Image (cartoon, helix red, strand yellow):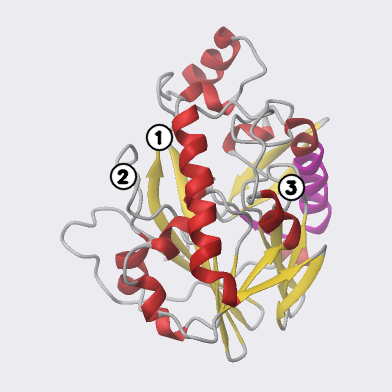
Amino acid sequence: MSNAQTIPRKVVTQERPAPDELVPSRYAVRVGDIDVLVISDGILTPPAESMATNVEPEVRDAWLDDRFLSKVAFDWALNAVVVRSGDQTILIDSGLGEEYPDFPRAGQFVHRMEAAGVDLAAVTDVVLTHMHFDHVGGLLVEGVKERMRPDLRVHVCAAETKFWQAPDFSLTAMPPALADLARKASLDFLKAYRSNLRTFDEEAQVAPGVVVTRTGGHTPGHSVVRISSGGERLMFGGDALFPVSFDHPEWHNGFEHDPEEATLVRLRLMRELAETGSWLVSTHMPFPSVGRVATAGDLYRWVPAWWDY
């Protein structure tokens, strides 16, 4: 079969959710010989206007109305990924953490990792797509660092660590309170994990078949992770792609530090995904966020995978 026809194989687990877990929170696929587990950290609810800061409110509201979505607070899924390649267990991003009471539906990272049977002590590597608070926060939860291996490797783009030492929010539309949270979380993370950092300039192989590559745009060091094995491919797109990106790739997200560059990045990635037939998982696509990208005239469309039970 070609890459575009190959379907990831579901890894079936028998554990029942805890009584307070009324929705699925993990979904497993195989990419060749590599296991990929998508774990939901919950839902973020930023202001709806943050999804499209360069359009008139009525245009944005019409898009939301067409999808029966709130015009006040836009529900964003928050997904992290665990990858097992060879003898390495790799965590890609870590969700929100516990310090953000304005987002009570997120911050589920620790107990959902445990529910999925992932031992924090077994994680050999962490890859950060970037250092926004909803990507590093889970690793800042009290007690998590102590449960990780002392030789843990944290892979992050060098441009990202440099940026957060003196971040520039001038091109974002982040509310001041969220900008303060982002600044604090990044600095807290750098302080806590500095000795574990393994920085790269443009690209690094984390494990066999697992490569992280800088894209820039959303943040200066924003990166995506490409996973390939046995002729199958999957990309973890971080914050390069959002649900609205397929209809309106030109709409700026309020959290983008270089909105114009971020638009070029998502167009480039969607073109790659459509041409290669690679699967896509992305931080804020609706859980389980497994799907493909297809061409639709001059734009692209999201084709979610059929759930495999």
Kindly identify the residue that appears in the image at 29 percent across and 41 percent down: 101
Give the residue type at disc 3: Pro
Residue at the limit of the structure toward the left, as seen here: 19
In this picture, is 75 found above or below 59?
below
Q: Residue at x 49, y 28 (%)?
A: 176
Amino acid at circle 2: Arg
The amino acid beneath tag 1 is Thr
Is residue 209 at least partly visible in the picture? yes
Query: Is residue 276 magenta-colored?
Result: yes
Looking at the image, residue 238 sits to the left or right of residue 112; the answer is right
Image position of 208 (left or right of 98): right
Name the mark on residue 220: 3
Which numbered tag is attached to residue 105? Answer: 2
Position above or below: 104 against 135: above
Label annotation for residue 45: 1
Distance between mark 2 and mark 3 Cα atoms: 28 Å
Q: Image quadrant of residue 56?
A: top right
Q: Whole-percent x and y of residue 34? A: 62, 80
Q: Are dots 2 and 3 in contact, CB under 8 Å?
A: no
